[in-house]
Amino acid sequence: MKKLSLILFLIYSAALLYAQDYYRYDLLNDKSYHSAINYYPDSLKSDTNVYHIEISPLFNIASGRGDNGKHAIYSGNVGVEVKADLLSKLTASYRIYGGFSHYNDYFADLADSIGYIPAGGNFYKNGNNYYSIYHEFDITYHIADYLKISAGKGRKKVGDGYRSLLLSDNNSGMYYFDITAGTGGLQYIFSVNTAKNIDSECSGSRTKYLIYHAFSWNITNYLNIGGFEAVSIMRRDSSGNSKFVDLHYLNPVIFFRPVEYSVGSPDNVLMGVFGKVRYYQKNILYGQVMLDEFNSSFLKAGNDWWAKKFAFQAGARGEVFDRFTYIAEANYIRPFMYSHDNAIRSYSMCSQPLAHPYGANLKEGLVNLRYTTRNEIFNFDITADIVKTGIDTDSISYGGNILLPYTLRGDDYGQSMLQGKPLTITDLSFTMEYKMKLNFNSKSYILKPFVTFGCYNNEEKNIYFLIGIKNFDLTRFY
């Protein structure tokens, strides 16, 4: 019988819900470490007229029971975060954390199957314990008020939803180089990203590239629209080694689809649109549409054509009353969406989807409610998520696993939603968090004791319970 352990655990949190104090759309929202660096009031500071430096310890302690009480679950990581602001032109940050964890069976199986801790990174396994270390950083230079360049490693997200069907932050992060331009109500981002991914033709991993650009336009104070285009690239030289991308894609103002046709490339190009409308003070309606295989056949073919690949999202979020926020969202993703003829050209990084964490061939409905007490000491968070999908049962791909080549499909027609073995995934969780402020020699330190109850039902009902203390959250789930 394994002993319950109390250990150190940490990760940068961005569970803060959308705030509309200013109706300016940020292409990379609060959940992205790359776009939003939240300064800790409890960090060690060094200030001069030239620079500002902050150093913050990172930790989280959590322990509990999982899989209907069959065994202990725990996780412990420690780390540090350093941030610097030089002459208000150059900002830099570096975060590193690592430790070990013992997960629920279903989460451990997922990590084993993809070779990465979801939303974490590489791991070393000893028995049932997973040891990992993760780092992320960002260096940004503000050339002007309307132009900046950034380089680093981290997660990104495009959109206002709980999920994103364009680019999500539920993966292990990528190395990136970004150019961000815009002023007033118009914003544009051009981004080059690189990471490792599975190459199904050589049964190993190789370097691949993701290049995307996105724009966002505030038409009025109540209406925002935007566009998104991405290309997933992996090229090999004559020796079979990875080589750099076609230079045409590095033009920051070109459309990827014409380039793909003109150079006859096998790359995977996706296009999307998104938008939102404010309908009552701090409440919005938002949506996304993502297209894979967009051509004239797409418009003419029936709904059962395999290459009719698209996804859409519709949702609402905001405040019911002061300190009570909500998200209500629906997602719909056709079979074979985000997949390609090889796993490395699929819309994925480190064997994890870059959009929805469950891949494709699914329908989802979810609700998230969060309440903060008047004194901001207690937070209560409830999430209910139901996903209907179809999973593979034989050598044929039914379109849910985006890492499988779409060439493994059956016929070109007769490909329907939720095909394969029917599966309903239900994820319910409740978290209560207490914000405890400690003062040490005029410096304050924030600790957050928390309790989480959850039920994850994926063919087998798994109930878990966690209690711990932290100074920020994990994006990974149990």
Image (tube, rainbow, N blue to C red):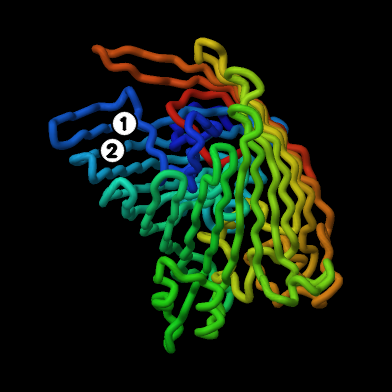
Residue at the far front: name it: 220
Q: Quadrant of residue 362?
A: bottom right
Q: Which residue is mark 1?
A: 56
Q: 108 or 291, which is in the foreground? A: 291
Q: 302 or 65, which is in the foreground? A: 302
Q: Residue at x 71, y 66 (%)?
A: 309
Which of the two labelled residues, at mark 2 and mark 1, occupies the earlier sequence position? 1
Q: Quadrant of the N terminus?
A: top right
Secondary structure under badge 1?
Answer: strand
Q: Residue at x 72, y 34 (%)?
A: 384
In the image, residue 31 above or below residue 167:
above
Q: Quadrant of the C terminus?
A: top right
- Whole-percent x and y of residue 448? 47, 21
* In the displayed structure image, the side of residue 439 where residue 454 appears, left or right: right
Residue at the far bottom: name it: 238
Secondary structure under badge 2?
Answer: strand
- Whole-percent x and y of residue 419? 83, 61
- Tag 2: amino acid: Val
Q: Quadrant of residue 77?
A: top left
- Whole-percent x and y of residue 116? 52, 54
Q: Which residue is mark 2?
A: 82
- Whole-percent x and y of residue 283? 63, 31
Whether the residues at callouts 2 and 1 have beta carbons within 8 Å, the answer is yes
In the image, residue 296 above or below residue 91:
below
